[in-house]
Image: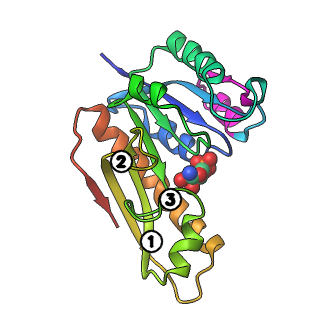
């Protein structure tokens, strides 16, 4: 039976597109839904143009902060699509421990640093500031600890002497587009061993 994947986005959706593009042919999974917490997310039209069902759950309807109302509505959309795996791909909301524990072991995220270094935001500026010689991205299982779940894959790139957060972000994003599909392909086939790309 084909493994069903839902992808959660907030923005441009370039990682989502890389995942969707990879899910064909002998891939063990297929995309069944792309959901955004922002109706204006450019990734939604991109997903629709790729033939994937889309939905939005506007987080502003539920007030500030993370919350039961938003997640309840999100969960309802997900239940209709019946995914086996959730991929967070540039999804900018922190999920509650209740939501995470419901999906734990079935939910992945991509983070633009070599975890466990630089959890949270502004990863590229922090890596440059710290004088790192290499940077990269990681795909990990989502647990209640922010960016702290088991790492399933990493990809690294050299930090140039004149690197800026913007140039590093562009380099790392290209790597993300290779790493996330590679990890999902293995994870959907039941392989949780860690992958290193370089
Ligand atoms: C990526 O760098 C991802 O790692 C970060 O947000 C960015 C999302 O880009 N969390 P996109 O929406 O996949 O284009």
Which of 2 and 195 lies nearest the eye of the viewer? 195
Above or below 190: residue 84: above
Element under disc 3: loop
Residue position marked by numbered label 1 in the rendering: 135
Residue farthest to the bottom?
Answer: 161
Which of 68 and 81 lies nearest the eye of the viewer? 68
The question of residue 125 being in magenta is answered with no
Please name the residue shown 65% across and 71% down the image.
166
Q: Position of residue 90 (x, y in %)?
A: 58, 45
Please tell me which of labels 3 and 2 falls first in the chain. Answer: 3
Q: Position of residue 187 (x, y in %)?
A: 30, 37
Please give the range of residues in magenta.
Answer: 43-59
Q: Quadrant of residue 189?
A: top left
Residue position marked by numbered label 2 in the rendering: 182
Element under disc 1: strand
Crowd around label 1: few <14 · some 14–19 · many ≥20 (10 Å)? many
Front label number (3 vs 2): 3
Residue position marked by numbered label 3 in the rendering: 112
Q: Is residue 156 left or right of residue 72?
A: left
Q: Position of residue 36 (x, y in %)?
A: 65, 31
Name the image quarter holding the N terminus.
Answer: top left
Label 3 lies in ligand 1 vicinity (Cβ under 8 Å): yes
Q: CA distance from mark 3 to mark 2?
A: 16 Å
């Amino acid at each position: 039976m084909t493994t069903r994947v839902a992808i959660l986005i907030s923005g441009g959706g370039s990682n989502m597109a890389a995942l969707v593009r990879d899910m064909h042919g002998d891939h063990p999974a297929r995309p069944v839904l792309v959901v955004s917490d922002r109706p204006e997310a450019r990734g939604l039209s991109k997903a629709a143009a790729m033939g994937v069902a889309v939905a939005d759950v506007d987080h502003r309807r539920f007030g500030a902060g993370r919350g039961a109302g938003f997640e309840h509505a999100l969960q309802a959309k997900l239940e209709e699509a019946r995914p086996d795996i959730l991929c967070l791909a540039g999804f900018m909301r922190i999920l509650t421990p209740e939501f995470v524990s419901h999906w734990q072991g079935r939910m992945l995220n991509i983070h633009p640093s070599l975890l466990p270094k630089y959890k949270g935001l502004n990863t590229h500026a922090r890596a440059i500031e710290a004088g790192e010689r290499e940077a990269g991205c990681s795909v990990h299982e989502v647990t209640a600890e922010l960016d702290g779940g088991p790492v399933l894959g990493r990809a690294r790139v050299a930090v140039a002497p004149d690197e800026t957060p913007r140039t590093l972000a562009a380099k790392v994003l290209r790597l993300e587009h290779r790493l996330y599909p590679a990890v999902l392909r293995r994870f959907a086939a039941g392989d949780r061993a860690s992958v290193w790309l370089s």
